[in-house]
Image (spheres, rainbow, N blue to C red):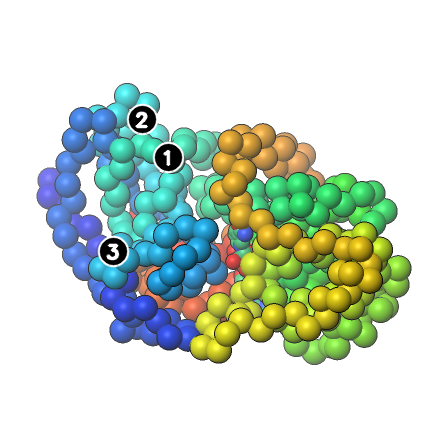
Amino acid sequence: MSRINHQVRLAARPVGQPRPTDWEHVEEPVGEPGEGELLVQVLYLSIDPAMRGWMNAGRSYIPPVEIGEVMRAGAVGRVIASRHPGFAVGDHVSGTFGVQEYCLSNGRGVTKVDPALAPLPTYLGTLGMTGLTAYFGLLDVGRPQPGQTVVVSGAAGAVGSVVGQIAKILGCRVVGIAGGERKCRLVVEEFGFDAAIDYQAEDVRKALREHAPDGVDVYFDNVGGDILDAVLVRLAHGARVVICGAVSQYNNTEPVKGPSNYMSLLVNRATMTGMVVFDYADRYPEGIAELAEWRAAGRLRSIEDVVSGGVAAFPETLLRLFRGENLGKLVLKVGGE
Ligand code: NAP
């Protein structure tokens, strides 16, 4: 049977927020796997703020997506043909399959996932890249101690919601920062944080004085910009600031807004450290095992925001992240199942 692969390729490097003309929608026949290859039908795509960075030219922690290339994306799918000894037809797999309906892969970076243990979208969130980012970023870089105060921004999102819940498991006081009343309620009522600050309606500096009266021991920063600056002035002695991302800055046409209040690091003998989850690749199994255990024990809730529409809906779905329209991990449903 001849199948058609619908793909979304990068057509132009965006200036500011990506526009429809930055993408090209392409159809091509699906190839057959060669020796050592497998053919994956993509079922769910991970939609990540980092995608915006991958669209830019220039040096980063990963090469940019080239013009004309299929847009890079993490995904889960099902093996529908295989000439690879490690994968059989019917296996469910996770990998960087791209914004397309089918992917031919040589198996490198592809891992099997078990839909009996967790719904497939969860392997893109809590049991996937964003869960691992939260896990290693908080434990390895943030290093919170029981009783300490952990503040996390993007608190209702994929990474932030897991960071706060792990910090609660560790016995910390946890304050989330998120946009809007609905998200703040979710952060406290569903994810069990001690408090939430609505940065759209409250003065973050003032609210932190109330919710972190002894200062912030760990700040896990997902957003950068003004919120980072506001938290910096509330650091406790010896605080650790984890620079995970700066989503508020990704569509800037001006240079990234750096923190003005960085002298707080000196005053408080604090550190600010960048982390990239890929550096922990050899420890992923350890992270996944503990996250899965917490999830199975009901100590870690995961929420996936699954949008339908297939690959054609990708350009619009990506923008949801920058409008704050997602609750938990944003996933785009692509194939059947
Ligand atoms: P997410 O938090 O699920 O979604 C993005 C959220 O960012 C939105 O829902 C929105 O929440 C918030 N946001 C958007 N524009 C904003 C603005 N101008 N100011 C403040 N908040 C804004 O996304 P995620 O996948 O979990 O990623 C969170 C961060 O982690 C991103 O910065 C991402 O790049 C980073 N990350 C880093 C690594 C790594 O290895 N370092 C790995 C994965 C992700 P509100 O409605 O609350 O504003």
Quadrant of the snapshot with the C terminus = top left
Q: Which mark is residue 259?
A: none
**In the figure, is residue 306 to the left or right of 228?**
left
Q: For mark 3, give the secondary structure.
A: loop
Quadrant of the snapshot with the N terminus = top left
Using the image, determine if residue 282 lies above or below residue 5.
above
What is the C-alpha distance between the residues marked 1 and 2?
Answer: 10 Å
**In the figure, is residue 219 to the left or right of 280?**
right
* Sequence-first tag of 2 and 3: 3
Q: How far from the left and from the top, in percent, is residue 164?
A: 69, 51
Q: For mark 2, give the secondary structure.
A: loop
Q: Which mark is residue 87?
A: 2
Residue 174 in view here: no
For residue 224, what is the image quadrant?
Answer: bottom right
**Pointers 1 and 2 in contact (C-beta within 8 Å):** yes
Instruction: Give neighbour class at mark 2: few <14, some 14-19, many 20+ (Cα, 10 Å).
Output: many
**Pointers 2 and 3 in contact (C-beta within 8 Å):** no
Q: Quadrant of ligand 1?
A: bottom right
Q: Could you tell me the amino acid type at mark 2?
A: Phe
